[in-house]
Image (cartoon, helix red, strand yellow):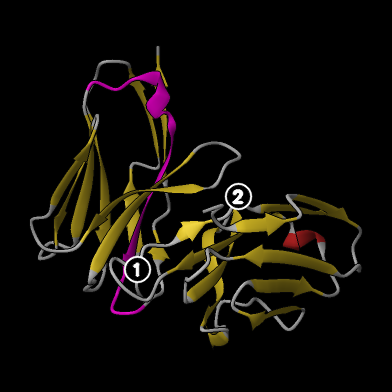
Amino acid sequence: DAGVIQSPRHEVTEMGQEVTLRCKPISGHDYLFWYRQTMMRGLELLIYFNNNVPIDDSGMPEDRFSAKMPNASFSTLKIQPSEPRDSAVYFCASSENRGYYEQYFGPGTRLTVT
Amino acid sequence: ELKVEQNPLFLSMQEGKNYTIYCNYSTTSDRLYWYRQDPGKSLESLFVLLSNGAVKQEGRLMASLDTKARLSTLHITAAVHDLSATYFCAVAPGTYKYIFGTGTRLKVLA
């Protein structure tokens, strides 16, 4: 299995622009998670999905952030409009609904908003 | 509010030495996880601990769990440079959500 796939790996954009981050979970995994990692705040869970349905979005910082999962193999995290304080590494992770519920992380997208 | 605290936050140690990283959490949790993150890389799962008294070992790393004390430890034996990384613990208090600790940045000096 290729593992969790994220794109792009790096994104540099100007303040005010729309940014879309993409994630393909491991095939067969029921859960998908979006995290943000910064030096100041560490690893924060933004939102997670179960069977393509958003279950908990309490970590989404504000209305500028939105996430969708139109099917079992694809999810997006969108920021519109972007701000410099959104600069961070965004990770996607997926897990099965059985066993240890272990989360497998993608390589991350490093976002820089200038 | 559920808190997961790790200490130390930074650890610089000599090769060949032993040390322990501590993970304290503030509420009951069904499971506890340890992850490793190399600089600029993603998180890699190391251990999953499921019950009180659980102990798991992989190479020079050994993790244990005391659910009564709400404490997990990650013990490093005879450290080598390749173990330099940031180590995170995470708890899953009855749900699929993880709550991650602050991380411990380990640097092993040759």
Give the left or right position of residue B14, taking residue B65 as reference.
right
Query: In x, y percent, where is residue B61?
Result: 25, 35
Does residue B81 belong to the magenta stretch?
yes
Q: Type of residue at label 1?
A: Tyr
- Residue at 53% x, 72% y is A32
Q: Nearer the viewer, residue A33 or B13?
A: A33
Nearest to N terminus: mark 1 or mark 2: 1
Query: In x, y percent, where is residue A23?
Result: 66, 65
Which element type, helix, strand or loop, lies under badge 2?
A: loop
Write down the quadrant of residue B99 in the picture: bottom left
- Residue at 50% x, 66% y is A94
Which element type, helix, strand or loop, lies under badge 1?
A: loop
Does A22 appear above or below A56? Answer: above
Give the chain letter at badge 1.
A
The residue indicated by pointer 1 is A101
Residue A90 visible in this rendered orientation of the protein: no
The residue indicated by pointer 2 is A107
Give the left or right position of residue B76, taking residue A73 as reference.
left
Q: Nearer the viewer, residue B74 or A106?
A: A106
